Image (tube, helix red, strand yellow):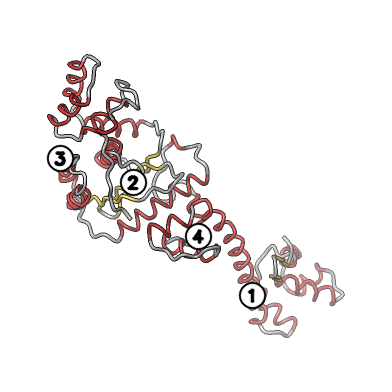
């Protein structure tokens, strides 16, 4: 490390820079100067090379030896520290700009009302930083920043981690701003049963299930999808309540309800974290099974499959869905997922896409 740093238009001098000049002008060796100063040659060498901060003790000794004030030397150190911090901040801003380009400012502007700031990248960084409530966008690149990243996501790119963390941070901020009672597992199980009665309520289900979940201490947050996040949902303890987030990229009946019940399963099992595409850990498989069995009773489903003899029609799917009080799209999606029907089977009219105001 040098006893001065130059970065762009900033030049910062360590107190050791000035001490070195004084030693040179004194005609003494560093060892002799150190002895007169009352310190070791090693300490003086570290100080001169900028590898050690100037202590109050050395500042006091320099003031006595050279007839200066203690504050003069401490001010030199403070000025150097401030300059270092400014340089570090400028370097970090460059990293933040790169991260924001990955996230996309449009997502925050279009969905959350941030101001339009075309080509003003530094100002955009400041806006997103403030909106997310973080000191730097660089924190978003750290795995497990706010929720657990399960082992199956080990190969995620830094950009993917940043996008996922951004969504989770928005959901957490939403949850923190929401008054919620203590999480009650029994009430939440009852709320899930109520939610399952709403699969055919295509326009008004969201506020209804959100309210029932909240009564059980679970804050449901549906967010606009951040492209590239590969995030299905997340759960996290917030004080004595629970935040449960899903995104809106899969608002067809089958995929939306499966994702919702999958995250609910994580809450029921006390497994908090974030869910991604293609997760294959034990916790994910357990949550998948919970969602499958809650959406369609396994015994009734297998009886329907056997009775159909492998021949499924739109009318038979609608009839079975009606008998179990589920949206037909949920049954269709399950049959496709299990390989009984191929995708593009001509029955896509059974699949309803929800329109939910989520931002």
- Kindly identify which residue carries mark 4: 136
- The answer to whether residue 188 is seen in the rendering is yes
Foreground tag (1 vs 4):
4
- Distance of mark 3 from mark 1, alpha carbons? 66 Å
Residue 86 to residue 208: above or below: below
Can you tell which mark lies on residue 197? 3
Q: Is residue 211 left or right of residue 152?
A: left
Q: Is residue 341 left or right of residue 31?
A: left
Foreground tag (2 vs 4):
2
- Crowd rating for badge 3 (residues with CA inside 10 Å; few <14, some 14–19, many 20+): some
- Kindly identify which residue carries mark 2: 248
- The answer to whether residue 183 is seen in the rendering is no
State the residue lying farthest toward the top. 309
Residue 125 at what x, y percent from top left?
51, 62
- Distance of mark 2 from mark 4, alpha carbons? 27 Å
Secondary structure of the residue carrying tag 3 is loop
- Contact, mark 3 vs mark 4 (Cβ under 8 Å): no
Work out whether mark 3 precedes mark 1 in sequence or the reverse, and give the earlier one: 1
Work out whether mark 3 precedes mark 2 in sequence or the reverse, and give the earlier one: 3
- Kindly identify which residue carries mark 1: 79
Secondary structure of the residue carrying tag 4 is loop
Can you tell which mark lies on residue 109? none
Work out whether mark 3 precedes mark 4 in sequence or the reverse, and give the earlier one: 4
């Amino acid at each position: 490390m040098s006893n001065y740093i130059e970065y762009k238009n900033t030049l910062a001098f360590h107190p050791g820079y000035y001490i070195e000049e004084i030693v040179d002008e004194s005609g003494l060796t560093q060892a002799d100067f150190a002895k007169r100063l009352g310190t070791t040659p090693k300490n003086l060498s570290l100080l001169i090379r900028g590898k050690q901060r100037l202590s109050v003790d050395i500042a006091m000794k320099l003031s006595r030896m050279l007839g200066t004030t203690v504050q003069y030397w401490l001010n030199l150190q403070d000025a150097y520290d401030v300059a270092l911090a400014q340089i570090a901040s400028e370097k970090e801003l460059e990293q933040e700009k790169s991260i924001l380009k990955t996230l996309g400012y449009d997502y925050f502007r279009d969905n959350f009302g941030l101001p339009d700031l075309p080509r003003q990248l530094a100002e955009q960084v400041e806006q997103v930083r403030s909106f997310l409530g973080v000191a730097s966008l660089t924190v978003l690149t750290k795995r497990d920043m706010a929720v657990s990243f399960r082992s199956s996501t080990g190969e995620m790119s830094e950009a993917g981690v940043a996008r996922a963390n951004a969504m989770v941070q928005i959901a957490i901020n939403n949850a923190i701003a929401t008054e919620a009672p203590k999480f009650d597992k029994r009430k939440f199980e009852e709320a899930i049963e109520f939610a399952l009665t709403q699969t055919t309520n295509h326009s008004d289900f969201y506020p209804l299930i959100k309210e029932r979940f909240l009564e059980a201490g679970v804050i449901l947050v549906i967010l606009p999808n951040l492209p590239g996040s590969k995030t299905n949902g997340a759960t996290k303890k917030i004080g004595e309540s629970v935040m449960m987030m899903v995104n809106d990229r899969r608002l067809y009946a089958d995929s939306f309800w499966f994702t919702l019940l999958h995250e609910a399963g994580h809450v029921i099992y006390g497994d908090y974290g974030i869910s991604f595409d293609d997760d294959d850990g034990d916790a994910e498989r357990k949550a998948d099974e919970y969602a499958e069995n809650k959406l369609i009773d396994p015994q009734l489903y297998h009886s329907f499959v056997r009775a159909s003899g492998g021949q499924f029609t739109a009318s038979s799917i609608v009839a079975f869905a009606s008998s179990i009080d589920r949206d037909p799209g949920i049954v269709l999606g399950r049959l496709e997922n299990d390989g009984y029907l191929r995708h593009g089977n001509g029955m896509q009219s059974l699949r309803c896409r929800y329109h939910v105001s989520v931002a």
